[in-house]
Amino acid sequence: MPVLLRKYYRRIYNRFAIPTNPVADNANGRLRQYKYRESLALKTGGAASTFLGALIIAVVATDFSKHAPPWIRVLTFVVFIIVVLCIVIAWSGFHWAAESLERDLAAGPVDNLGGWPLRPEVAWTTSLYLFILDSLLLVAVVVLALI
C-alpha cells in the first residue's frame, strides 16, 4: 500500500476503531469516550444514513431502475435497513453505557469500570462496513439501470 494511503487509512482507522487505550483508571475520561461514541453514532450515522436513504429512494424506488434486476433492488433496501438498525444499536448501547456510568459517578467513586461495551462497538463497525456495501449496491443498481 502506498505511504500516502497508509497514512490516511491509519488516521481513519484510529478515529473510528475501538480505543486501544480506554481510560480504564479514569471514570470521567471513559464517560467522555462513551459520549463521543454516542454522538458519533447519532450525528455521523444519522446524516450518512439519511443521505443514503434519500438516494436509495430516488434511484431504487422509481422507474429509473426498472431495468435493474429486482433482487439487487430488494437487497439494497434490506442492507440499508440493517445499516440503520446497527446505527440504532450502537447509539443506544453507548448511551446506556454513558448513563450507567453517570449514575455510578453520582452515587460515589467508581472502582471498577468494566470493559469496553462490545455489542455497540460491533454494531457501529458493522454499520460502517454495510454502509460501504450498500453504496456499492446502489452504484450497481444505477449501472445496471443504465445498461
Image (cartoon, rainbow, N blue to C red):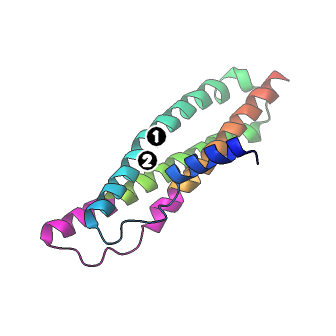
> Looking at the picture, how far across and down is residue 109, in whole percent?
17, 73
Most distant residue in the bottom direction: 111
Name the residue carrying label 1.
Answer: 44
Identify the amino acid type marked 2.
Answer: Ala
Answer yes or no: do the residues labelled 2 and 1 have beta carbons within 8 Å? yes
Q: Secondary structure at mark 1?
A: helix
Magenta extent: 96-123
What's the CA distance linking mark 2 and mark 1?
Answer: 6 Å
User: Is 113 contained in the magenta span?
Assistant: yes
> Looking at the picture, how far across and down is residue 14, in whole percent?
53, 53
Q: Is residue 112 at all visible to an observer of this figure?
A: yes
Considering only vertical position in the picture, is 79 above or below 106? above
Name the residue carrying label 2.
Answer: 41
Image mark for residue 81: none
Q: Which of 15/106 is in front?
A: 15
Asked if residue 53 lies left or right of residue 107, the reply is: right
Considering only vertical position in the picture, is 17 above or below 7? below
Asked if residue 33 lies left or right of residue 81, the reply is: left
CA neighbours of label 1 inside 10 A, class few (<14), some (14 to 19), many (20+): few
Q: Residue at x 55, y 28 (%)?
A: 54
Q: Residue at x 37, y 46 (%)?
A: 39
Q: Residue at x 29, y 78 (%)?
A: 112
